[in-house]
Each structure stands twice: as structure tokens, then as C-alpha cells.
Image: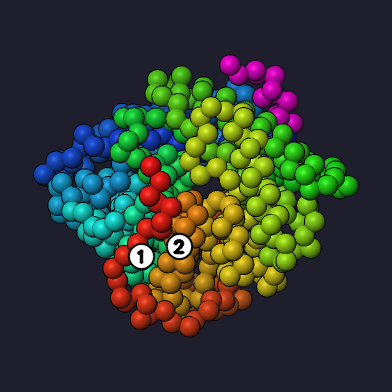
């Protein structure tokens, strides 16, 4: 039972500390939309999304007005489209255009699920969808795409890793006149969760209900403000303080999710209690780490500090809701975090340090801009490294990396909105081409045999 008083005491955080609900995401199963006729299938997809999510945006706006809680994004996630493409055949871009039409009709910020799950190999429709991703993202504005290429249970599909390095480069090149934005809407995952409300990795898992509401909370500014009030606290006291703060933030997410579920008449899925930063001043995970005691995010001690923060957020949040899921942790997307941007600009934060940080937080190498002449093989190597961290540590990891076509280290890409702007970061250019070209599959680790 939610105590409204517990929620209302956090309202003061909204104006002063950038507290918000980052997203309410409606997951919709499209398994009943499959047809051997791709045009008929696309029509079913459009009709079902418009019917199920007809009042999603309106409901979110009404909750915002009634409770004074900003809900930044209203989104939809759908069953991986590769499944439908395998049934219908034909050009999968038609599905992307149907999703875009539905997004415009219902007014959501994004639809996620132009996706394929290929951690163990390629089923019918998977390769067709993967090959279509650059064109699909270039021709749409509101569609996000993800490909899961590995898991702790299956190992890493190195054929998919090789292909995705090429597709990321192709997506950037095809939208080079629009800040390479297609690559910013594409993420490669290991251990992808089926109930993630955050883009670009959101899709509606096949084990999920027909329709469900998931909520993603935010609140880096709130945590930073809380830590700043106690400069003399020990580390364990700081951890306890973060736990209590995360509890309050998650309770607000629980309230919004319960209200949205009731008003839309669909089950309440999960609260994802991730600390999701924005480019706004005062809403940065990097600034939390610096408030705790680092001179600059990326310096010595960063990984340890982030591990403590991530653990405390999870412990506090899980006590506030019986529906915690998704990714749930601290995000470190460079272009979306004002402190990360500053640290990258001055050279304190490198891709190698970010990779170490991803071993202890959610989710991975996120919104990182690299030189436009980076080869597909180097991109594939980065994907393989990050997937290995996820596979061995039984956690979700991801790569959302943007080759800035025509730009070099020190230049910047400007995405706008929540995607922010990103300095072009240097990349180790020693080629892993022979390793990547071998193909095959990295076997699952020994601890995958738990049952």
C-alpha cells in the first residue's frame, strides 16, 4: 500500500534537483499480428498499437498535472520485429514505417522493438531485419533498434558482432548530414532484459503479458544534492544516505506506475530504478561521483565510487517497490550527462575507463561519439569486449556508439534534447580484424550451468 505522504515529501526535489519520471513505457505484444502477407501484418501492427496506446500520452499528462510530477517521456515497446519479419518475409523496413506511423498517431516520443535476439544464432527474419536497420532508422524519427548478440547462457555470437560493427558504421554514414543520428538510436546488447522501459534497448519480451506498463525513474540531481549536505560522512554513511534517497525516488515511480496501470486498464509491470542523467546542469551521475570525493570523473577511484553508488541505489530502490526490474542502476551515457561531457572534453574520461566502469553499473558504453574513420572491425571489437563483461558477470551490458562521419577527436556532435551533445573521443585503432573475421561463437562461461 502506497503512503501518499512518502511521495509528497519528494515534490520539493522536482523544482530544485531535477527529479522526474524519465518514462512510462507501454509494452505491447505483437505476436497476434503475424501474417504471411507483410502488408496485412503491418496494418495489424499499426491498429493494435493505436488501440492499446491510444490514451497513453493523455494519461501521462493528466498524472503530471494532478501530482506535479514531470513525466518526461511516454513510450511504447513492442515484440521484436524480427519475429514478425520471419513470418511474413518481405522488406522489414515496412514494419519500421508502420511503427513510425503509429508513433505519430498516438504522440509518443519513441517506439522500441525494431529488434532481433541472436545470441545463439540467426532464426528466420533476424538477418533480414539486422541488414535493414540503417535504412529503417534513417527513414523514421521515433523508432529505436536493438540487437542482443550475447548472454551468459548462450555465449557471444561473433558473427552477429561482426555484422553489427558494419551496421553501426552504415547507420552513421547514411545520416551523416543529420549528426549521424541513426547510430544514436541503435544499441547492441548482451543479456538484454525483456522489460526494459529505456530506449534504445526497449522491446517487449515474448514472456511478457499482452500489454503492460513499465516505469523508469530518474534522480541523479536528488542524490547529488543529498550527498552535498554531508561533506564529512564516511563512505558507509554515504551509502546509507543514497539508499534512503533512492527509496524515496522509487516510491514516486511506484505511484506513477500504479496510477497509469489503473487508468489504462493494463497490468503494472516494473519500476526501473536507474539513475538516468540528462545534459541539464545538476542532473549528472558524474557530478554525484565528484561530490563523493573525486576530483574528476574518470580519475583513479572512479570505478570503486560508481560500484558503491550503483549498489546503494539498488538496495534502496528494491525496498520501495515489489516490482523492481529492467536495468536498475546508474547510467553513464556520455552525451546525456553534463559531468561526463566535461570529463570527456578535458581527457579525464576515456573509453577504456568507461569500459571498466561498465563492469559495476548499468548498462554499458552508451552515447559515445568516436572518430568517423573508425573501422567497422574496431567497432566490433568494442562490442565484443563489452559483451564479454556482461556475459562473464551475468549482467546487462550494451554498446551505443556513434561514429561521427567527417569529424575527428576534439570535434562534437549535437543531438539536442535528452541525447545532448558529445565530444569525439579517441579510440585505440589497433585492428582486431583477424579475431573478428573468425566468426563462430564464444562459448558460455562455466557458471552458466547453474540450474
In front of the other: 234 or 148: 234
Q: Residues within 10 Å of mark 1 (few under 14, many from 20)?
A: some
Q: Is residue 26 magenta?
A: no
Q: Position of residue 344 (x, y in %)?
A: 65, 68
In front of the other: 6 or 320: 320
- In the image, which disc is placed on residue 88? none
Query: Which is more N-terminal, label 1 or label 2?
Result: 2
In the displayed structure, 123 sits above or below 405; it is: above
Residue at the (76%, 38%) spot, across then down = 241
Residue at the (56%, 58%) spot, across then down = 358
Residue 424 lies in quadrant: bottom right
Q: Is residue 5 magenta?
A: yes
Whole-angstrom CA distance, mark 2 to mark 1, is 9 Å
Q: Magenta residues? A: 1-12
In the displayed structure, 438 sits above or below 69; it is: below
* Tag 1 secondary structure: strand
Residue at the (57%, 24%) spot, across then down = 255
Q: Are marks 2 and 1 in contact (CB under 8 Å)?
A: yes
Q: Using the rendered image of the protein, determine whether residue 367 is visible from the camera's viewpoint.
A: no
Q: Using the rendered image of the protein, determine whether residue 448 is visible from the camera's viewpoint.
A: yes
> Which quadrant is the N terminus positioned in?
top right
Q: Position of residue 299 (x, y in %)?
A: 72, 66
Q: Position of residue 353 (x, y in %)?
A: 62, 67
Residue that protrudes farthest toward the left in the picture = 36
Residue of label 2: 388
Q: Position of residue 232 (x, y in %)?
A: 88, 47
Residue 279 as seen in the image, left or right of residue 25: right
Residue of label 1: 442
Amino acid at each position: 500500500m502506497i503512503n501518499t505522504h512518502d511521495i509528497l515529501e519528494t515534490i520539493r526535489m522536482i523544482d530544485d534537483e531535477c527529479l522526474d519520471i524519465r518514462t512510462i513505457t507501454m509494452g505491447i505484444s505483437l505476436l497476434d499480428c503475424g501474417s504471411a502477407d507483410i502488408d496485412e501484418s503491418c496494418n495489424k501492427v499499426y491498429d493494435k498499437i493505436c488501440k492499446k496506446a491510444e490514451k497513453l500520452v493523455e494519461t501521462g499528462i493528466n498524472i503530471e498535472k494532478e501530482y506535479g510530477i514531470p513525466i518526461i517521456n511516454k513510450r511504447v515497446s513492442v515484440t521484436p520485429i524480427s519475429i514478425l519479419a520471419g513470418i511474413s518475409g518481405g522488406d522489414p523496413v515496412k514494419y519500421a514505417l508502420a511503427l513510425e506511423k503509429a508513433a505519430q498517431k498516438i504522440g509518443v516520443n519513441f517506439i522500441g522493438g525494431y529488434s532481433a535476439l541472436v545470441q545463439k544464432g540467426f532464426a528466420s527474419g533476424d538477418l533480414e531485419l539486422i541488414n535493414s536497420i540503417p535504412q529503417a532508422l534513417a527513414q523514421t524519427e521515433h523508432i529505436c533498434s536493438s540487437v542482443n548478440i550475447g548472454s551468459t547462457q548462450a555465449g557471444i555470437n561473433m558473427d552477429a558482432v561482426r555484422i553489427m560493427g558494419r551496421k553501426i558504421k552504415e547507420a552513421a554514414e547514411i545520416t551523416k548530414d543529420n549528426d549521424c543520428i541513426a547510430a544514436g538510436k541503435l544499441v547492441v546488447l548482451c543479456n538484454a532484459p525483456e522489460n526494459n522501459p529505456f530506449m534504445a534497448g526497449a522491446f517487449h519480451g515474448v514472456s511478457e503479458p499482452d500489454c503492460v506498463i513499465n516505469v523508469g525513474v530518474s534522480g541523479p540531481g536528488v542524490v547529488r544534492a543529498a550527498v552535498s549536505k554531508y561533506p564529512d560522512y564516511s563512505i558507509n554513511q554515504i551509502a546509507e544516505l543514497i539508499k534512503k534517497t533512492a527509496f524515496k525516488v522509487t516510491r514516486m515511480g511506484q505511484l506513477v506506475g500504479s496510477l497509469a496501470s489503473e487508468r489504462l486498464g493494463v497490468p503494472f509491470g516494473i519500476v526501473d530504478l536507474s539513475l538516468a542523467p540528462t545534459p541539464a546542469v545538476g542532473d549528472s551521475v558524474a557530478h554525484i561521483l565528484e561530490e563523493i570525493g573525486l576530483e574528476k570523473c574518470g580519475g583513479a577511484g572512479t570505478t570503486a565510487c560508481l560500484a558503491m553508488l550503483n549498489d546503494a541505489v539498488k538496495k534502496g530502490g528494491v525496498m520501495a517497490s515489489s516490482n523492481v526490474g529492467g536495468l536498475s542502476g546508474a547510467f553513464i551515457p556520455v552525451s546525456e550527462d553534463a559531468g561526463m561531457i566535461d570529463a570527456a572534453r578535458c581527457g579525464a574520461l576515456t573509453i577504456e575507463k568507461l569500459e571498466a566502469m561498465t563492469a559495476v553499473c548499468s548498462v554499458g558504453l552508451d552515447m559515445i561519439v568516436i572518430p568517423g574513420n573508425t573501422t567497422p572491425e574496431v567497432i566490433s571489437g568494442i562490442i565484443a569486449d563489452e559483451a564479454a563483461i556482461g556475459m562473464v558477470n551475468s549482467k546487462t551490458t550494451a554498446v551505443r556508439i556513434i561514429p561521427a562521419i567527417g569529424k575527428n577527436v576534439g570535434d562534437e556532435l549535437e543531438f539536442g534534447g535528452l541525447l545532448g551533445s558529445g565530444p569525439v573521443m579517441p579510440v585505440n585503432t589497433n585492428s582486431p580484424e583477424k579475431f573478428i573475421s573468425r566468426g563462430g561463437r564464444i562459448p558460455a562461461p562455466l557458471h552458466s550451468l547453474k540450474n
